[in-house]
Image (tube, rainbow, N blue to C red):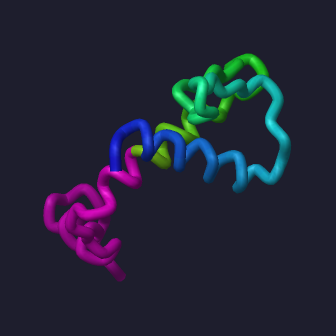
Amino acid sequence: MTAKGIFEDCLNWVMLLRGEIMNGIKFLVDDKGKRTAVLIDLKKNSGLLEDIFDCVVARRRKNEPRESIESVKQRLRQQGKLPPDD
């Protein structure tokens, strides 16, 4: 999927998740009605850009290896960054 496609999917997901009609968002379309750009009024939608960014980052990392929270805690304990587990 292209970066534009990921962005558009995330924008749609965030709007759906918020469950509200969002003012201050306008789509520019070509002569065939295809979305080509989006204008976001950040004064009206201050947290929207951060939500979209988080979604895009998660989508781009979906195929990266995962690590359990327990293995992270164990590694941090070994490095002395967490107290020993009692």
Numbered range of the magenta stretch: 57-86
Vertical order, 64 against 28 (above or below)? below
Relative to residue 12, is residue 59 drawn left or right?
A: left
Q: Is residue 65 magenta?
A: yes
In the image, 1 versus 73, the foreground residue is: 1
Relative to residue 10, is residue 79 drawn left or right?
A: left
What residue is shown at x 72% (from left), y 27% (from top)? Answer: 25
Q: Looking at the image, which residue sits at the far bottom?
A: 86
* Count of numbered circles on the image: 0
In the image, 9 versus 70, the foreground residue is: 9
What residue is shown at x 75% (from left), y 50% (from top)? Answer: 18
Q: Is residue 69 magenta?
A: yes
Residue 23: x and y in percent read 82, 29
What residue is shown at x 74% (from left), y 17% (from top)? Answer: 43
Vertical order, 69 against 54 (above or below)? below
In the image, 83 versus 24, the foreground residue is: 24
Residue 48: x and y in percent read 64, 34
Query: Residue 45 falls in which quadrant of the image?
Result: top right
In the image, 15 versus 32, the foreground residue is: 32
Residue 30: x and y in percent read 57, 25
Relative to residue 42, is residue 79 drawn left or right?
A: left
What residue is shown at x 42% (from left), y 37% (from top)? Answer: 4
For the C terminus, the quadrant is bottom left
Q: Looking at the image, which residue sits at the far left?
A: 78
Vertical order, 15 against 27 (above or below)? below
Query: Residue 85 falls in which quadrant of the image?
Result: bottom left
